[in-house]
Image: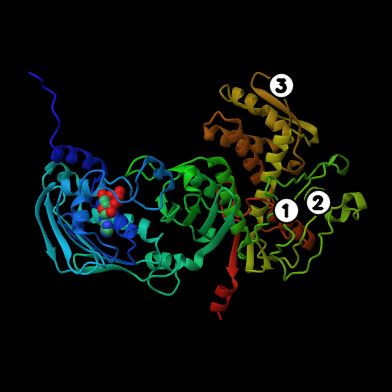
Amino acid sequence: MDIIHLLPDSVANQIAAGEVIQRPSSCLKELVENSLDAGATRIEVLVRDAGRTLLQVIDDGKGMSDTDLRMAFERHATSKIQEAADLFQLTTMGFRGEALASICAVAQVEVQSRRAEDEMGSRLVIHGSQVVEQEPCMCAVGTNFKVKNLFFNIPVRRKFLKTDQTELRNLLAEFYRIVLVYPKVQFTFVSNDEILMDLPAGTEKQRIEQVFGKGQKQTFTTHLVDIASDTELVSIRGFVGKPEVAGKNAQQYFFVNGRYMRHPYFHKAVMTAYEGLLQAEVNPSYFIYLSVNPETIDVNIHPTKTEIKFQDEQPIFQILLATVREALGKFNVSPSLDFDRSGYVEMPVGTSAAVRPTVPTTIDTSYNPFQRTVSKPSALNWQHLYTTPLAEREPLREEQQPLFEQTWAVSQVYQYNGRYLLMPTEGGLMMVDQHRAHICVLYNMYIHQMAEQRTVSQQLLFPEVLSVTQEEVPLVESILEDLRFVGFDIERLDPQSFSIAGVPSMLVDKDAIITLQNILTSVRTTGQDVQQQWRKQIALSLAKDTAIPYGKVLQKEEMEDLMNKLLALKNYRFTEDGKTVVSILSDDELAKKF
Ligand code: ADP
Ligand code: MG
C-alpha cells in the first residue's frame, strides 16, 4: 500500500500559518499592512484581551469585490505581484499572498468589504479555513476585518501566548513600527474599549511626538536632532537623540523604504557616532529612515523576520556614521568640534618643536560654535604647558605656532571653586571638571604615544626600584614596551624587580612606584590579554595620577590651553571610564532660574 498522500489544505495551511502568525501582534502586522497596501487613510485597530479573543482592523481603503474577497484567503493569492521579477520592485508591504490564508487557518474570521464602485459590500465568515458564510451586505467603503479566538483550533499555540500585558506590549510595539512610517495615515488603537492611541495625520516628527511624548507639548521631540543626507547609494533622513537625554529606555528605530527593520550593523554605525558622548549604560534614541533603490536590498527573507540584507552595507555604514556624527556636532549645545572626520587630532605634548610632524587637518570652517566669543588664537606654546612653569615660557616664535590651526579659540574661561572651569558658549554655559578634563587630554596623549611608539622620558637622578611578585613578572614583561612608550625608562634588574631610570615628565615630582603599581593593578583587573585594552588601562591610570588635581588654581592661559586641548578631542564629554567631564547649562535652563 502506498503511504504518501497530500495533506488536506486546512492542515497544510495550519502548518504554514505557524510560520507567519505566531501571536496576535503578527496578525495585527499583516492586517494593518494590507490596509496600507489598499491605500487607507484611516485605520482603526481594536483588540480585546490583547488580541486573544478579538483583533479587529477597520480601514477606508479600496476594498475588495466579492470574488476577490473569496480569493484573498487562498494561499499565494495576491494582487500585488505577477511574476518573480516584481519581487525586486516592491512598493507594497505584502506580496506573498500568505497572510490571510494563514490567519483564517488558525482563527474565526469575519470580513466585510466594499469597493467605492459597488453599491453593496460582501461579508465572508471563515472558521479554520472552512468558509461558513458569504453574502452581500451593507457596509462602508473599505474593509472591516475581525479575527476572533486566535488559535481556537491549536490549543498548544494558545498556551504559548504570554500574559495579556505582554501580548498587549507586543501589539503596541508592532503598531509603533508601522505608524512611525505612515504619519500621513490616521490611526487609532483601542484595547478593551479604552483608546490607547489616537494619532491624527501629521509629519514624521509629530508622529514620534504623538507616540512617545507625554501628551504635553513637544516633550520628546525637542530632544531630537534632525539628520539628513543624500547620496547615490542611500538617502538618509530622521532624528537622533541628544546625548545628554540618552537613557535606559531608548527608542531605536530603523526603517528602509517604508518598512521597519532591525540592523545590528547599522546600529553600530550610529553608536560609533555617539562614541565619547555617552555615559556608560545609556542609549540614545533614534529614528532613521533610509531610502535605497529596492533592487539593492532583499526583503524576501522571511515574513516574520525584520532583518534586511543590503548590497552596499559598508559604504552605507560610513555614510550613516558621518551623517549622525555631523548632526551631533552641529546642534549647538554640543560644541563637538568637527576637526577630524578622519580620526585623531594630534596632540604631541612634550615633543620638541623640531620633530613635531605637521598634521593635515580638514576643518569645517563654516561651523563655529563659539561665534559669540572672540576668535583669538591661543598664544601659547602647547608643548610646554604643565611641564614648564609659566614664568619660564618663552614667547612664541614663528615655527612654534600651535600645531593645528584653529578656526576658533577658547577665551573667557573662569575657574570656580578650584574645581570647575566655566565658559560661555553658543548654546549655554559650559561647565567643565578640571581634573577630569585633564585626564581626558592626558589619556589621549598617552594612547597616542603608545600608538606612535614615541618615547619621551625624564631621567631621574636616583633610579628607583619596582619590586613585584612572582606572578606579576610576566605581566610587567608584557607591558614593558608600552610603559617605555609612555615615558618609563624601565629595565629588568633581577628576577623580581625592575629599575626605573626615567619617568613620564609629568610624574617627575610624584611617586613613580605608586603609579606603576596602580597601572599594574588596573591592567591585571582588565583580565584581558589584549594589548589595546592594556594600553587603555595604562593610559588611564597614568592620566589619573598625573592630571592636575582639584584645588589647583589655574592661570588664564592654563585654562584656555586645557579647554582648547579638551575640545579638540573626539570624545571629550566623558573620561574613558565614563565620568562626566562637560556639562552644559542651556540658556533656557538658566533663564528658568530667574
Ligand atoms: P499579500 O498582502 O501578500 O498580497 P495577503 O494574504 O495579506 O497577501 O492578502 C491577499 C490579498 O487580499 C491582497 O493581495 C489584497 O489584494 C487583498 N486584501 C487583503 N486585505 C485587504 C484590505 N484590507 N483591503 C483591500 N484588499 C485587501
Ligand atoms: Mg498582506
Q: CA distance from mark 3 to mark 1?
A: 38 Å
Mark 2 neighbour class, 10 Å CA radius: few under 14, some 14 to 19, many 20 or more: many
Looking at the image, residue 370 lies above or below residue 340: below
Viewer-proximal residue among 578 and 82:
82
Q: Earlier in the sequence, mark 3 or mark 1?
A: 3
Give neighbour class at mark 1: few <14, some 14-19, many 20+ (Cα, 10 Å): many
State the residue position of label 1: 565
Disc 3 vs disc 1: Cβ atoms closer than 8 Å? no
- What is the secondary structure assignment of the residue under circle 1? helix
Q: Residue at x 62, y 42 (%)?
A: 540
Q: Secondary structure at mark 3?
A: strand
Frontmost of labels 3 and 1 is 1
Query: Which amino acid type is marked by label 2?
Result: Trp
What kind of residue is marked 1?
Lys
Q: Please state if 146 lies on the left or on the right of 44 as rendered.
A: left
Q: Is the C-beta separation of discs 2 and 1 under 8 Å?
A: yes
Say left or right for 511 vs 166.
right
Residue tagged by mark 2?
382
Q: Which mark is residue 493?
A: 3
Which image quarter: residue 69?
bottom left
Question: For the view shown, which residue lies furthest in the bottom direction?
Answer: 594
